Image (spheres, coloured by chain):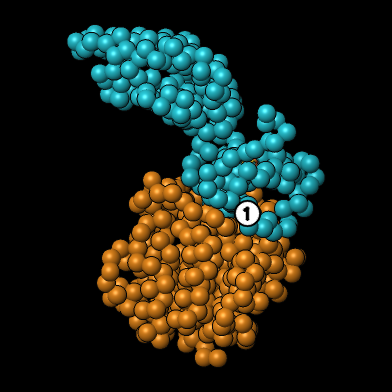
Amino acid sequence: MKSGSNLERILESGRFSVTAEAGPPKGSSPKVIQRKGELLKLCCDALNVTDNQTAIVRMSSLSGCVLLKELGVEPVLQMVVRDRNRLSLQSDILGAAALGIRNVLCLSGDHQKFGNHPTAKGVYDIDSIQFIQMVKTMRDEHKFLNAEEISGDVPFFIGAAANPFADPFEFRVIRLAKKVSAGADFIQTQGIFDMAKFVEWMKMVRDRGLDEKTHILAGLIPIKSVGMARYMRSNVSGLSVPKEIVDRMADAKEPKEEGVKICLETIEQLKEVDGVHGVHIMAVAWEDIVPRIVEEAGLMPRPVV
Amino acid sequence: MITLEQKKFQEIEKMTKGYNPLLVLGCETCAAMSFAGGQQQVAELASAIRIARKTSGQEGEVLEDAVARQCEPEFVDLIADKVGGCDAVLSIACGAGVQLFAERFQDKVILPGCNTTFLGVTEELGVWSERCAGCGNCILDKTAGLCPIARCSKQLLNGPCGGSMNGKCEISKEVDCVWQLIIDRLTRLNRLEMLEEIFPVKDWSPAGHGGPRKMVREDLKS
Ligand code: SF4
Ligand code: SF4
C-alpha cells in the first residue's frame, strides 16, 4: 500500500469505487463542510474537498479535509498550482501528511480570471504534471524537489484529473500517459455527458494499457435544470454537453428527476466500460441528491475493506 | 520589439500639470514601431497637451523632441541641453527608457507617458501580440518554436490543460491556446513524440525571480 487510504484499499481490491465532492464555504463556519460530510459519509469512499474552485476564495481545502476527518469521513485534498509555488505546495503536503490526510488530487486550477479576484497574480511555478511527480518523489524517495531528504513518511495516494472532452482529442490520452508516468495512482475525469466520446477515449486509454496502471474514476455532474445544462453547454470550457441532453432537460416535466435519470443511465453505461474503476460525483450546490443517486445506481452499501 | 501604448490622455494631463516648460520626448525605435512615441505621435501628444492647457487657462510651454533610442546613454545624453532647460520630461518610451533618463538626469522630474506592454510582434498594422516573456533560458527548441511561457495563460510546460477547446484558451475565445498550436506544428513536423516526455520544472531564477537581472560581456567592455 502506498498510502493505506480507504480509497486506495477499495480500488486495489478491484471494487467499483464512489467518490464525491464537497466544496468549502465562502466563510469560516465549519458547519457547511460538516453537514456535507454527514450527508455523504455512507455513500462514498472518499470525499474531495475543492481548492478555491473556479478561482473563488473559499475556506482552505486542507481545513475542510481536517473537518471531514474529524467526522470519520476520508478526504481527498485537492490542490491547485495556481495559488502556490513549489515551497508552499511541498509544505502543505507535509502538513497534510502530518494531519493524517492520505489522498491528494494534483490540479492546475481554473485560471484566476474566472474567479472573484480576477486581478490576482497567478503563481503557476510548476504545472500539474510536475506536481504529481514531485509528490511521488516525496512519497517514494523521501526527497524534496531540490533532492534534500525529508524526515518521516509522506504516504499519499496520488490523484490527477483528466478531461477527455478538451482539445486536441488525440493528445488527451498522451497527456494522461504523462500523468500516469509522473505518478498518478488514480484519475478523476471531467463530468461525462458525451458518452460516445468517453468510450472512444477509454479505448485509446486501454490500447496504451493505462487502465492497468492507474484507476480511472469517471466524473459525473448531476444536472438540476435546463438552465444549468445550457450554461454548461455554452459557457464552460472543457465540458461537452450534447444537444440531446439539453433537449431532454428542456422537455422534462420534472427537470430534477430527469437530471437524476440521466445521471443513473450514465452510471449504468459506465459500469460496462472496461477500465472504469469507479465514479466521481460532482454535485455542485446539489449534494443532497448524491445519496439517492448512489443508492439507485446499486452502489450501496459501500464496501469495507 | 518592445510594445507600448500611450497612457490615457487624462492620466497624462494630470501627471504633467504645472510643469513649465514640459518636454515631450519620443523614442524612434520600439516606441515608434508601436505608433506610440515616434515623431508624429510626439507632435500630436504635445499639441493635445498645449490645447488642454490653453482651454483650462493654464500657463506653460510644451516642447517636443525624439531621440533614436532612449535606452542608450549616448542618445540620451545628446539631448542634455534641452532637458536642462525644462521642468520635467514626459518620456514617450518604454520603462527602460524612462529609467535611463531618471539615472542620467538626477535632478529632473521624469514622467512615463506610456505603458510598456510586452515583447511581441506586429501581426498586422495596428495589431501586436506577445511572444516572449524574457525568461532567460529559451526552450523554443522543445516547443516547436512557440513559447508556452509567454503564451499559455498558465505557463504550463506540459500542456494543454483541460480548458483547451477548439484551439482556444479557456480564458477567452479570442485567445489561441498555444499548446494546440505547438501540437499542430509538431504534428506537421512529425515530431509529436517530443511531447511524450515530461518537461522538468523550470528554473525561474534567470526569469527575474532571482532578483534584478544584469548581463556583462567582458569582451565588449572597454
Ligand atoms: S522560452 Fe523564454 S526566452 Fe524563449 S521565447 Fe519563451 S519566454 Fe522568451
Ligand atoms: S487552454 Fe491552452 S493556453 Fe490556455 S491555459 Fe490551458 S494550455 Fe494554456
Task: Work out whether residue A239 or residue B139 is closer to the camera in this orientation and state it.
Answer: B139
For the residue pair A191 and B31, the one nearer the viewer reads as B31
Give the image quarter of residue B5: top left
Left or right of residue B128, residue A66 in this image: left
Kind of residue at badge 1: Lys
Q: Which chain is cyan?
A: B
Q: Could you say which quadrant of the image residue A61 lies in?
A: bottom left
- Can residue A233 be seen? no
- Give me the residue at 54% from left, 23% from top: B73
User: Which residue corresponds to mark 1?
Assistant: B202
Q: Which chain is orange?
A: A
Q: Position of residue B150 (x, y in %)?
A: 57, 41
Q: Residue furthest front?
A: B222
Question: Mark 1 falls on what kind of element?
Answer: loop
Residue B183 position, x and y percent, is 69, 46
Q: Which residue, as the protein is rendered here, is positioned at the far left?
A: B57
Residue at image location 56% in from the left, 19% down from the top: B74
* Chain where mark 1 sits: B
Q: Position of residue A48 (x, y in %)?
A: 46, 72
Q: Quadrant of the N terminus of chain B?
A: top right
Q: Position of residue A94 (x, y in %)?
A: 50, 75
Q: Residue at left 58%, top 77%? A: A150
- Ligand 1 found in image quarter: top right
* Left or right: A68, with B128 as reference point: left
Q: Is residue B87 left or right of residue B72?
A: left
Q: Among all residues in the image, which is located at the extreme right?
A: B190
Q: Image height check: is B168 above or below A136?
A: above
